[in-house]
Amino acid sequence: SLFLLTMSSHDDWLGYLVSVFVNETLTHAQECCPGCHDGKNSPLLHAHHHSGLLEKLTMFHMVVKDDLLKKMKDLLEDYISRFPDAKQYDEVDQKTLRAYGRDFLNQSSARFIYYSHYLTPAVDALLSTTPKTHIKPVTAKRVAEKMKKTKQVKKKLKSIEDSNLKAI
């Protein structure tokens, strides 16, 4: 379909977002690590070494997603500076890329970020560094609050679904 053809032309943009998402997740994991705060030397004393990437993505998904959504304009500017193409980045195309990026992040899950194939070796080669997007340092308390809000929203949605099913 035409929609898929258009989407596939923006795979580098989505790969860029995946890369930033993963790097921000790793940064958040280190910021929450008691071993890092206490200056411990051994990896055994650092919580961020104990979990795998998928677990970290799951733990910090909501926080990172919110940070990236708030910084979408800055992320697009950084992307354009790394992937210059004057024909592709007029005002309309930038709005389209921002919309794709917002939709991608809003519909994402930790598992989707982890298993998606948007981050290719070619995109990765251009991303030796990615911009820092989080506004304030993350803490375990901030992550817990965000996860609590997510669970409350899911419960509300479930109760609405249940009441709609009963009405049918």
Image: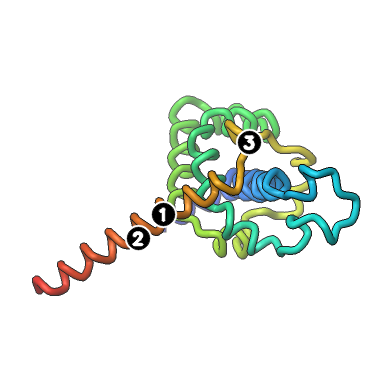
The answer to whether the residues at label 1 and label 2 have Cβ atoms under 8 Å apart is yes
Q: How is the image coloured?
A: rainbow
Assign the N terminus to one quadrant of the image: bottom left
Q: Earlier in the sequence, mark 3 or mark 1?
A: 3
Query: How would you rate the neighbour count of disc 2 (Cα within 10 Å): few for under 14, some for 14-19, many for 20 or more?
Result: few
Label ID, residue 114: none
The answer to whether residue 123 is left or right of residue 3 is right
- The residue at the far front in this view is 38
The kind of secondary structure element at disc 1 is helix
Along the line of sight, the residue nearer the viewer: 74 or 56: 56
Query: How would you rate the neighbour count of disc 1 (Cα within 10 Å): few for under 14, some for 14-19, many for 20 or more?
Result: few
The residue that mark 2 highlights is 154
Q: Residue at x 52, y 34 (%)?
A: 72
Q: CA distance from mark 1 to mark 2?
A: 6 Å
Along the line of sight, the residue nearer the viewer: 39 or 166: 39
Q: Amino acid at mark 1?
A: Thr
The residue that mark 1 highlights is 150
Assign the C terminus to one quadrant of the image: bottom left
Q: CA distance from mark 3 to mark 2?
A: 26 Å
The kind of secondary structure element at disc 3 is loop
The residue that mark 3 highlights is 137
Q: Residue at x 70, y 43 (%)?
A: 31
